Image (spheres, rainbow, N blue to C red):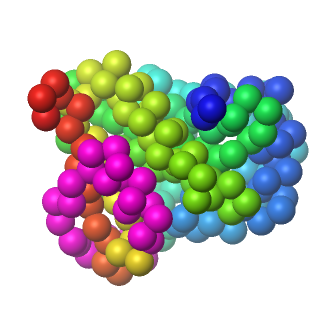
Amino acid sequence: MVTLVTPSADWLPAYRDALAAGWSPSTVRAADVAREQLDAIARDPAAFLATLDQPQPGGPPVVLPDGSTVPRLPQITRWITDGATFLGTISLRWQPGTDALPPHVLGHIGYAVLPAHRGRGHATAALALMLAEAAARGLRRVDLTVEPANRASIRVIEKNGGRRVERFDRPASYGGGVALRYAISLAPGG
């Protein structure tokens, strides 16, 4: 059974091992993000864990793939587990009081499952659990973006009620290229 856990010292060794083995929680700047996180864990594990759960606005700016910086939105990260094994990560970001996101944020939710655990429904279950978190925070709709060739992620989104809203060109700050935007309604009857 898939569960979401708040990142903690108990699960940190498994997370660090996944990073060290070449996995990344990000599809954008994947290797850089993994290296940066490994460095942050080595410097101060508690401070690193604190960066993953910031439900209030503020904190250090976010560095975009092109090196520019933008204000940090409230966000939470949860680690995906089956109770015994670290399976991946899922995060939610939002703007208080609105379902809209600023132009530099391509989606509300992002997730990554370790390669050895893909294809078993873990991402589908984790997304369903994170949608409940989003609804509890007052969101009535969430957007997710995906590469057109990522059929597995598209299936995960669609199994959770996602409907494609557009094909768009990613901003240059994200390296350009085509992406798909999906929306999932969290409103009753939506």
Residue name at image x 69 percent, y 35 percent: 82
Q: Looking at the image, how many numbered discs can be counted on the residues?
A: 0
Foreground residue, 190 or 21?
Answer: 190
Please identify the quarter of the rendering in which residue 3 is found.
top right
Residue name at image x 61 percent, y 34 percent: 2
90 lies above or below 33: above
Residue name at image x 37 percent, y 33 percent: 131
Q: Residue 57, percent across and down?
A: 41, 28
The answer to whether residue 31 is magenta is no
Q: Residue 44, percent across and down?
A: 82, 35
5 lies above or below 128: above
Q: Residue 38, percent across and down?
A: 80, 52
Q: Is residue 150 visible?
A: yes
Q: Is residue 67 visible?
A: no
Q: Residue 116, percent across and down?
A: 73, 60
Q: Is residue 184 left or right of residue 150?
A: left
Foreground residue, 84 or 92?
Answer: 84
* Residue reaching furthest to the left: 189
Foreground residue, 154 or 159?
Answer: 159
